[in-house]
């Protein structure tokens, strides 16, 4: 790693942002790895499973906008502490009240959605400590907290088999509490932050084509990442008849790969430019998911394809967020919330559409085929943005 990067910012705060992001993402997607057990107990069909595991993703998407605005007012450290306490209390109440109906599970989904809003808090906390030269690397390291989704897939199915899915939700408060204590010790607010934008400044931001472009780009990369993280345990179990723990382990492996490659995506964008990186990433992702849509006959082939797909999407996550502080240096909090929101919406769409495709056609293929087409559309859009943004810079 560049020695200049190590001296440029505040490493303890960067570590705190990563840890907070990591455990928050772990609980955000918990319903996915627990989905097999929950569906068995509540007698859910494929469409209901898809909607349930996708709902926390959608809730987190909406709450990210609110969290992003609060960050610009109160600072990321205070907002992170308040959000973490809210999730801990919500999970404790869930464990205490023991919801056992399909409708009551949507309360759980809302609580987990608060954890999903951590995205709009952790990244600004890391961003403000580093100069533009190192934004991609810093945001990539903090954003590698996506790996929390892999922890959920790795441990939740096995724990659910031993103690029940409801007790897993209760046990999830323990790492949340531990990280909250570490966060209080490590994280620092910067001496100065970008000036707080007024409500009237939202209008020009939302009228900006660059804003909408970044929102769309992230809805594809992160939407694909988190949608698959939430749904793949169910997919491997249903499509290839893997045991829940084995399906969770397969999901965890590919999610880890997509998570920890994110800093490489940010560093690649720092080196060659975010738009150039995204052109390649979207093209490759489209080809991979087009292949997956054909219905690979072997679980080993499917595992390899999903591994490559998640690596590609992880690179894209880092590349998109390298562009945010460059295009909007004074509105990082708001843009993080907006872009993060659409990433969550993309994840909700993918997870719910896979369940709907299975329910209506008996196959997951149509869901993956449409996602592949979306990747190709994104490739065309980012190519156009590259030409326009480069022309303006000159």
Image (spheres, grey):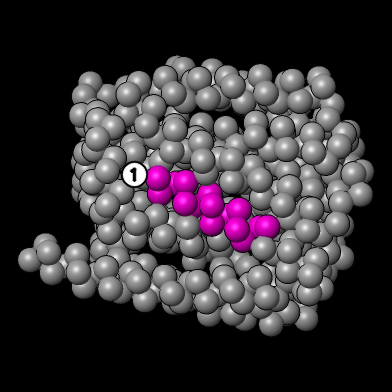
Vertically, is 69 above or below 74?
below
In the rendered structure, which segment of residues is drawn in magenta? 338-352
Q: Which residue is mark 1?
A: 335
The residue located at (32%, 24%) in the rendering is: 73
Instruction: Give residue 89's position: percent from left, percent from top.
Output: 66, 19
Question: Is residue 7 shown in magenta?
Answer: no
The residue lying toward the viewer, choosing from 197 and 135, is 197
Callout 1 crowding tier (Cα within 10 Å): few <14, some 14–19, many ≥20:
many
Mark 1 residue element = helix
Please give the name of the residue rendered at 78% of the width and 81% of the height, measured from the top-left corner. 297
In the displayed structure, does residue 68 sit left or right of residue 297? left
In the drawing, does residue 89 fall left or right of residue 115?
A: right
Residue 305 x %, y %: 63, 73
Residue at the (22%, 43%) spot, across then down: 329
- Residue 353's image quarter? bottom right
Camera sees residue 245: no
Secondary structure mostly taken by the magenta-highlighted segment of the chain: helix
Measuring 79% from the left and 34% from the top, which residue is drawn there? 104
Q: Position of residue 66 (x, y in %)?
A: 44, 33
């Amino acid at each position: 790693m560049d020695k200049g990067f190590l001296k440029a910012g505040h490493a303890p705060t960067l570590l705190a942002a990563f840890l907070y992001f990591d455990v928050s993402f772990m609980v955000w997607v918990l319903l996915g790895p627990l989905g097999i057990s929950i569906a068995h107990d509540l007698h859910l069909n494929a469409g209901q499973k898809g909607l349930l595991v996708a709902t926390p993703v959608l809730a987190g998407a909406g709450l990210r906008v609110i969290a992003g605005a609060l960050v610009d007012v109160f600072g990321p450290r205070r907002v992170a502490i308040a959000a973490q306490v809210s999730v801990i209390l919500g999970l404790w109440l869930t464990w205490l009240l023991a919801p056992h109906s399909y409708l009551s599970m949507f309360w759980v989904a809302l609580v987990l959605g608060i954890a999903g809003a951590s995205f709009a808090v952790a990244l600004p906390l890391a961003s403000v400590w580093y100069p533009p030269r190192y934004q991609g690397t810093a945001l990539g390291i903090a954003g590698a907290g996506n790996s929390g989704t892999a922890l959920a897939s790795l441990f939740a199915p096995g724990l659910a088999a031993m103690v029940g899915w409801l007790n897993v939700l209760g046990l999830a408060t323990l790492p949340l509490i531990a990280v909250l204590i570490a966060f209080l010790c490590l994280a620092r607010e910067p001496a100065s932050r970008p000036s707080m934008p007024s409500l009237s400044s939202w209008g020009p931001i939302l009228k900006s084509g660059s804003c909408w472009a970044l929102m769309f780009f992230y809805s594809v990369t992160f939407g694909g990442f988190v949608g698959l993280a939430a749904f793949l345990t169910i997919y491997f179990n249903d499509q290839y008849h893997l045991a829940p723990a084995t399906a969770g382990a397969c999901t965890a492996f590919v999610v880890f790969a997509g998570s920890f490659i994110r800093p490489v995506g940010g560093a690649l964008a720092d080196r060659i430019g975010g738009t150039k990186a995204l052109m390649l990433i979207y093209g490759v992702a489209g080809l991979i998911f087009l292949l997956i849509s054909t219905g690979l006959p072997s679980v080993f082939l499917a595992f390899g394809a999903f591994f490559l797909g998640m690596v590609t999407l992880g690179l894209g996550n880092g590349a998109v967020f390298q562009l945010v502080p460059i295009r909007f240096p004074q509105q990082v909090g708001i843009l993080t919330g907006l872009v993060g929101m659409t990433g969550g919406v993309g994840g909700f769409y993918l997870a719910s559409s896979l369940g709907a495709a299975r329910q209506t056609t008996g196959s997951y293929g149509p869901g993956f085929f449409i996602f592949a087409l979306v990747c190709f559309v994104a490739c065309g859009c980012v190519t156009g943005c590259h030409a326009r943004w480069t022309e303006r810079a000159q």
